[in-house]
Image (tube, grey):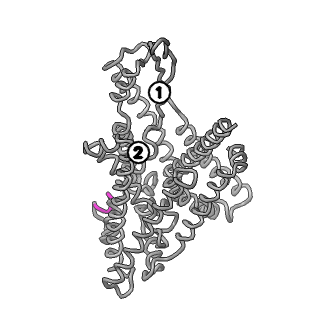
Amino acid sequence: MLKTLQNAFKVKDIRHRIFYVFMMLIVIRIGSQIPVPGVDREFFKNWFANQSGDAFNFLDAFTGGSFSTMAIFALSITPYITSSIIMQLLTIAIPKLEEMQKDGEDGRKKIAAITRYLTVGLSLFESTAMAIGFGNRGWIADINAMKIIVVVVTLTAGSAFLMWIGERINEKGVGNGISVVLAINIVSRIPSELYTLFEQFVKGKTIAKGALAGLIVLAIILTVVILVLILNGAVRKIPVQYSKKMQGRKMVGGQSTHIPLKINTAGVVPIIFASSIMSFPGIIASFTGKTGGTGWGTKILAALSSSNWFNLSHPAYSVGLLVYIVLVIFFAYFYTSITFNPLEVADNMKKQGGFIPGIRPGKPTVDYLNKILNYIVFIGAAGLTIVAVIPFFFNGVFGASVSFGGTSLIIVVSVILETMKQIESMMVVRNYKGFLND
């Protein structure tokens, strides 16, 4: 990885692209410190600190702390991510969108434009709900219609600006723009979280106990990172053989290749979906001020909060973990089913004269791909669950309060690996161009 970066900086064009990304990241972090005009940041900071559950911690981790400090980038890039997922689902449900997606570059541009409009719409909805919900409770001093409009416009513009930055990184940087924006927000929280762990488990202890605690924390983090690397790199290769055929007077084809099926076919989407659903009731309860009490509603909210899982004093709350695991597995299968179509793959192979050795073309190939896919999706979902649950375990048993966990590490590691692949591909293209020019 370091060798790739070293070689990349020797190429002027790639060096400029990396520098452009670096400057955009600085802009993002500056914007994450600028407060929303007209709001009482101390009120919101104190309110956020008094939240007993983790309904908003998931969002705050994705915004790089902008949400808890109520900066202009408080919504971050999450409306765009939600819009993209919605568009993927709608593409399957609406034939016209499916045709648009298959219509080459023009179709993809139209879908991208619709996604942008949907992002702005979601940002308006979320910022309006926040302005009205929190404003009536003292977040906006002397609340009136004009102040609400200012807050809504500021938060919406901040989210739209981050979307624009992501697209500029795609165009003038090294690609993966939206992912890079999300990753830098997550990474920005890690130093403060590590310092929190240091204060909680190392500071004030004897040298032996402090060193042991530090080594345990480091070992846990390294274990999660290694598991993420294994999960991201694991691939099931399905061999494909192409028959020889005559083209003119020449015999072509006959080569062997493979279909690479990633073990983690759905990426981090199942965890994001599951965490969002588990957090949604808590967010609604916080908006409406119904977080207190001792009734069944409060107990259900406590069970849905990951901060209460593995809590030895309240073991019954860990039932929420079972719901979480079921949701992760369900969304892993669901998302894979809408992004990978075995029937389409089998048809394409048949048209090109390809077949899987030992498997007849047509329906047998579809059945075989479905069978393999079901196995690897379950393995990938199980791996995702393990990575996500490890931080929950130590948070619950040892009281370690950190917002970056398996989900955050999966995103950061995946973005780093994908970005390095993009840089390597740029270098390969440049080498080909240089060879052709010579």
Q: Amino acid at mark 2?
A: Glu
Q: Position of residue 368 (x, y in %)?
A: 37, 22
Q: Position of residue 405 (x, y in %)?
A: 52, 52
Q: Position of residue 412 (x, y in %)?
A: 55, 51
- Residue under circle 2? 105
Q: Main secondary structure of the magenta part?
A: helix
Residue 64 falls left or right of residue 269 = right
Q: Range of the magenta residues?
A: 297-301
**Measuring 43% from the left and 56% from the top, which residue is drawn there?**
308
Q: Position of residue 431 (x, y in %)?
A: 66, 39
Say whether residue 264 is magenta.
no
Residue reaching furthest bottom? 142
Q: Nearer the viewer, residue 250 or 351?
A: 250
**Measuring 43% from the left and 65% from the top, which residue is drawn there?**
159
Task: Give the number of the mark in front: 1 or 2.
Answer: 2
> Can you say whether 160 is above or below 338 in the image?
below
Quadrant of residue 378 in the image?
Answer: top left
Q: Amino acid at mark 1?
A: Ile
Position of the C terminus by quadrant: top right
Q: Nearer the viewer, residue 285 or 108?
A: 108
- Residue under circle 1? 259
Q: Is residue 399 visible?
A: no
Q: Nearer the viewer, residue 438 or 260?
A: 438
**Measuring 43% from the left and 18% from the top, which residue is drawn there?**
356
- How many other residues sit within 10 Å of disc 2, few (<14), some (14-19) or many (≥20)? few
Residue 191 falls left or right of residue 267 = right
Whether the residues at callouts 1 and 2 have beta carbons within 8 Å, the answer is: no
> Can you say whether 97 is above or below 188 in the image?
above
